[in-house]
Image (spheres, rainbow, N blue to C red):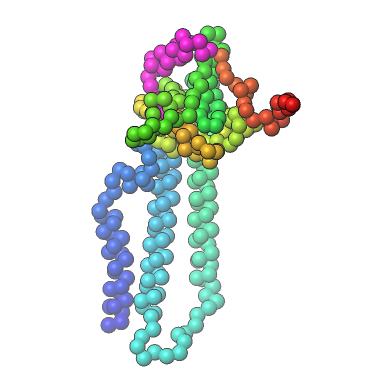
Amino acid sequence: MRFNRRLRWAAVPIAATLVVVLAGCTQAQLRGFLPGEPGITNHTDRIAGLWTTSWMVLILVGLITWGLILWVAVVYRRRKGQTGLPVQLRYNLPIEIFYTIVPLILVIGFFAFTARDQAAIEEPTENPDVQIEVFAKRWAWDFNYLNEGPGSEGVYYQGIQAQETDEAPFIDYEQLPVLYLPVGKTVEIDLESRDVVHSFWVVDFLYKKDNVPGKSNYMYFTPLEEGEYMGKCAELCGEYHSLMLFKVKVVSQGEYDDYIQSLVDAGQTGTRGPEYNTNTNQPGTEAPAHRE
């Protein structure tokens, strides 16, 4: 009788697990509820795979752990009429080895797969098709399209922070800085800062990296799907951090060339580099002279 009761309690978590598995998963669930769609860049599927696989392993470990806890709590609970302490068990060498080795294997596995995917994502692209310098500034973005325009001296775009409005959605999205990228072309982005630490984050690209004063960081990827994607600063950088928004437009090569030409026609040739930085505390810069 006691054995049958134990089987009944063991069947409950197993049945619940089977119900969840057999119910199937939506596309959002298969991607771990990450933003965006599959295949937006050459890295997004890799990132989503690492994320969802990690959670599957963690959920499995959690189910086993919770199941064992419930099993012990139910099967070995104090019965009516029982007194004193139950039999004390300790120094069980096989169990101690098990609960030491298994977490160690999990940690090593998470580290190995993360290091593998990070190395692939961070691998520099030789001779990228497009090179762009992104300068973060409080509280907007400047984009230098290198090797473009007359004499391949570059063209630039200077953005302003998001403009607030009185009506929903309370932001004028038409005035946000826009970064144009050609679809299917390899891209190298040089991340710089004009003042404090910012963070360049295109949400649907599932990757972000900091803009650090006095240090160049780089991102390498290939956009694979045309569309408009929202970006933002992901590092608290001051009073108007929430308004440090931008958009990325992935367009055809023809549209990209037309946009570059529009910057040339507007006289926005050359680049706007570190000479416009406002941080005067970096090595090699001098604070403005004090006025009496």
Q: Which of these two is toward me, 60 or 202?
A: 202
Residue drawn at (53%, 38%), measured in percent from left and top?
Answer: 239
| Quarter placement of the N terminus | bottom left
Judge left or right: residue 25 versus residue 129. left
Q: Quadrant of residue 251?
A: top left
Among all residues in the image, which is located at the extreme front? Answer: 292
The correct choice, above or below, for 280 with respect to 29 in the image is above
Q: Position of residue 240 (x, y in %)?
A: 50, 36
Residue drawn at (39%, 75%), measured in percent from left and top?
Answer: 73
Inspect the magenta stretch and tell me whether residue 103 lies in it: no
Q: Position of residue 223 (x, y in %)?
A: 42, 28
Number of numbered discs present? 0
| Quarter placement of the C terminus | top right
Q: Is residue 78 visible?
A: yes
Residue drawn at (53%, 8%), measured in percent from left and top?
Answer: 150
Judge left or right: residue 196 versus residue 99. right
Residue drawn at (29%, 55%), measured in percent from left and top?
Answer: 21
Q: Position of residue 8 (x, y in %)?
A: 28, 73
- Stretch in magenta: 247-269
Judge left or right: residue 5 versus residue 131. left
Q: Position of residue 23 (x, y in %)?
A: 25, 53
Q: Which of these two is toward me, 215 or 81?
A: 215
The correct choice, above or below, for 63 with respect to 133 in the image is below
Q: Is residue 284 visible?
A: no
The correct choice, above or below, for 52 with respect to 171 in the image is below
Inspect the magenta stretch and tell me whether residue 263 lies in it: yes
